Amino acid sequence: MAELLFEVLSEEVPARMQARAKDELERLVAEKLKSAGLAYERLNTFVTPRRLSLVVEGLPERQPDISEERKGPKEGAPERAIEGFMKGAGLTSLAEAELRETPKGRFYFAVRHIKGRETRNVLPEILVEVLRAFSWPKSMRWGESDFRWVRPIQNLLAVFGGAVLEGGLSLAENEQLQFKDSTVGHRFLAPDRFTVRGFDDYRAQLEERYVLLEADMRRKRIVEQCSQLAHEAGLAVQPDSALLDEVAGLVEWPCALIGKIPGELMSLPPEVLTTSMRSHQRYFSMVKPSGDLADRFIVVANMDAPAGTPLAATIVAGNERVLRARLADAAFFWDQDQKESLEARVPALQSIVFHAKLGSLAEKAMRMAVLARRMADYVGADPREADRAAMLAKADLTTGMVGEFPELQGIMGRYYALHDGESPDVATAIAEHYAPLGPSDTCPVAPLSVAVALADKLDTLAGFWSIGETPTGSKDPYALRRAALGIIRLIVENKLRVPLATVVAEAAAQILNELKLREQLEPIRALDQLVKDGGGGERLVEVEASLLERLDVSEVDEERVRFVVNALLSFIADRVKVVLREQGVRHDLVTAVFRLGGEDDLVRLLARVEALNKFLDSEAGANLLVAYRRAANIVRIEEKKDGRRYQGAADPSSMVAAEEKNLHQALLTAERQAAAALEEEDFTGSMEVLARLREPVDNFFAQVTVNADDPALRANRLALLSQIGATLNRVADFSAIEG
């Protein structure tokens, strides 16, 4: 058994791509080794900013010998078939084949024995195939060749059993990256080449040369150093796992150093300070024991520069200078932005296009205001404040601060709203109207914030469905799935009783009417522009007047609105299934409830699904589902055979057996009691009612022959079976339940 060590040394790989690249390398190598018949004991991959490494332990010295068998034509087959078989099997004569007796006659078989190759000779081919098959989100083409990689490759280390592999990666004509048994350490601290014989040697020598191969080790080192610096300063590091992962992907030898923020810049909003440090400079923020932001930051350098050394001082001074310049720009924007109110900025939204077909952000803000007032009724918010918050929600997009820091849209709106004297609720609604942005994002709970957030997302979804631009496959350029999930979370987590069909219809009607009006006004605007430009004179004015007279200002037809509503509710239902699946709830149960129709209250729908889930998990529920399917299958088969439907209530006067009379009475009782429970939204109670049907249904199937000789009796019994399905389907469509 031997060990394979492989390393691709390149220019810096973006941190966001490293984890995926590590997994890709492991997958590709594992697949190629398996296809080559090379078993192994362990396979591990590693990634740093400059190197992608792999070690495979327990590889055999050579491939196993294998035998391949190929079945040919039957004895006496046409000559052309024989020739094709020989060519495909690599035979020089038919005598090399075997004739075997089979149940279908005598057939030719070719057996080919393939001797395994030495692993050392196979691995170069595998590694080259891996390199060429590697996929990057973004890549660079190597000169005139067709080979692509994320960044230029500087070295290929390939050692098997302590010796370098022969060959390499062929690129352009007469250009090859040769496999080597050497590599280099840290770019600045240890750039000299060193020889490697195995993985343990490789990892140890890298660490001696200021490279920590494992990302976990780099993360651990960063955490320890940051904690130590924070302790010495009497502060704490603001937790940020995503930033920690990113920084660990930027350095091979982490060295944490503490810097200072100028006191005059600490008056900026904390979000501005942390965004500038985190997003632009990859610095860790620090907080005081009180929780307030401290005037300190931690930078992680890719150097060996202990605190107190001249090099450390130089690094800190350089980063302080960069941060000071960035924050000075922010301070300028902060001062300038406050000279103009958010309200005064609203007209400027007319120049920012939301979507070519859906108009400007100013138009979106007006639509949001209408929807926000409507949503205020459902969440218990002040309609006037909802209108105000919705109209101002997008205004901060015209500020210099948001132009410089797009991540702060909404957040800066809150600060500017408070500066303008808006109510705290309005300011908070402006800040939170984008939320929730993802499954881990906090969901707004303040009524006004919820109203505006729902209005924003409903308008977006209704807009794109109205113009037919919906997500396809994995493509969702406008984040419509995220918007739908946001609506679901806002409604469910706040337990809002919102009739989605109604509010979606209102949102769609707004947009469809706008689209209709915009389409009709287009020629009028064109004519108006010609008149303003001085062309055409009175004749153009007459034409314009004629067009205005023919202008159809009636509301869009209800059919188009209904189409958008149905399509969008179906999309939201699919998102609900995703949410519930993540919670361990079966998607078919959501379908079973949705198929009833008229259910657009998500809180009520989820309560139904929960009750149905518990019911089917019970013995009575599981058995009743079996009985339902048995009844439905019998009715379906007989309807197909007879060419008619067996629906409607069964006639009790035509019933003979006690079991069918009992079942009929039980169904009538269950239907009445279930309806009453559903009216009270007691979904658990409705399921308990259905559970009582198990015994009379079981007795019916045990004692009653459905296909009786008497046609009238048979038809009545089939109607009774159909009535079982009708009764159960008042609670949920049991035909949609799988398993």
Image: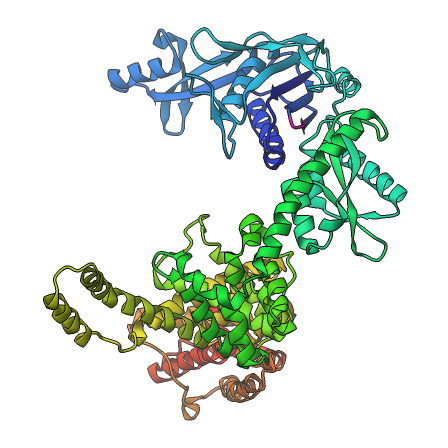
Image quadrant in which you'd find residue 42: top right
x%, y% of residue 428? 63, 68
Q: Residue furthest left?
A: 539
Going 16% across and 73% down the picture, which residue do you hit? 545
> Is residue 513 in the magenta section?
no
Residues shaded magenta: 45-49
Camera-side residue: 411 or 141?
Answer: 411
Q: Is residue 361 visible?
A: no
Going 48% across and 70% down the picture, which residue do you hit? 594
x%, y% of residue 357? 34, 59
Question: Considering the image in quadrants, where does the N terminus appear?
Answer: top right
Q: Is residue 644 left or right of residue 242?
A: left
x%, y% of residue 112? 47, 13
Q: Is residue 369 visible?
A: yes
x%, y% of residue 670? 55, 85
Task: Work out whether 112 lies above or below 573.
Answer: above
Question: Considering the image in quadrants, where does the C terminus appear?
Answer: bottom right
